[in-house]
Amino acid sequence: MMHLPQMARELRLAKKEGVEVISVWMWIDGRTDALGKLSGSNEKVFKVIDEVGYKGQIWVSFAANFFEDLSDSEAIAKGAEMIAFLSKRATTLGCKIGLYNHGDWFGEPKNQIQIIKALPDKNLGLVYNFHHAHHQIDAYPEMLDTMLPYLWYVNLSGLRKEGPKILPIGKGNHEKEMIQLLLDKGYTGDFGILGHVAEKDVELVLKANLNGLRTMHIE
């Protein structure tokens, strides 16, 4: 996780300045994370959350290797076990778990939803990211009907099938219709805009995305 050594300081500074931190991100890797035994980095995330009293969402993604050589049913069972473990820890700290699409098997909402359905007693939701949705553009209208009951957050990006992965909002040829469809179908959750360009000033990246969003005239 980026900025992990400064995470506690950053969260305290945000609170002091009145900046609401909606979520922190957690990456589960099959080489370093196992049920009941997380990597040092992920244990640090939980430690900092506890230390600073952060109350929010933890957006969880999985590396492909976590589900390597498993059937869909086996992967759902293994994913559900880990999400249940993470959710229990998060709940004790006043947080909840969002399932974050980041490509590969876990990046398919149909698989994430099956994991959520396997854990009906947990407070879980989906975080859908346009910047990992290039291969899902054609299937998006049908997918959206399935996702809507579980959808907490949608992170926006410009979208072209051919890429690039990160594109300013308004510079693609699919994001406007996809955002409009979300609203037409009654989505009332939150939207996010990511400053996901390492070589540029994040303030400028965010402003460009906001400007692009304004020019699309979403109804």
Image: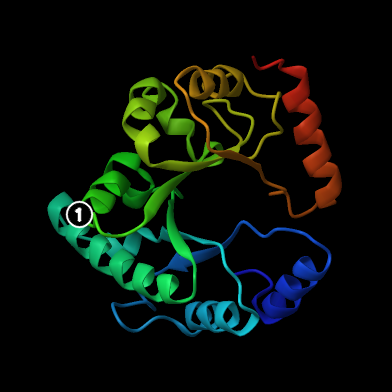
Identify the image quadrant of the C terminus.
Answer: top right
Tag 1 secondary structure:
loop
Identify the image quadrant of the N terminus.
Answer: bottom right
- Taking the spot 43% from the left edge, 60% from the top edge, the residue there is 97
* Depth order, front residue of 28/143: 143
* Depth order, front residue of 95/68: 95
- Residue 45 position, x and y percent, is 55, 77
- Residue 210 position, x and y percent, is 77, 33
In the image, 150: left or right of 160?
Answer: left
Vertical relation: 177 (above or below) 58: above
- Residue 81 position, x and y percent, is 24, 67
In the image, 156: left or right of 29?
Answer: right
Please indicate, yes or no, whether residue 165 appears anywhere in the rendered image.
no
Q: Residues within 10 Å of mark 1 (few under 14, many from 20)?
A: some
- Taking the spot 44% from the left edge, 20% from the top edge, the residue there is 185
- Taking the spot 81% from the left edge, 28% from the top edge, the residue there is 211
Please indicate, yes or no, whether residue 72 appears anywhere in the rendered image.
yes
In the image, 207: left or right of 80?
Answer: right
Vertical relation: 85 (above or below) 39: above
* Depth order, front residue of 31/48: 48
In the image, 23: left or right of 34?
Answer: right
Determine the image quadrant of residue 85: bottom left
Determine the image quadrant of residue 75: bottom left
Determine the image quadrant of residue 190: top right
Residue that label 1 marks = 118
Q: How many marks?
A: 1
- Taking the spot 77% from the left edge, 66% from the top edge, the residue there is 14
Vertical relation: 215 (above or below) 84: above
- Residue 54 position, x and y percent, is 61, 72
What's under tag 1, amino acid-wise?
Ala
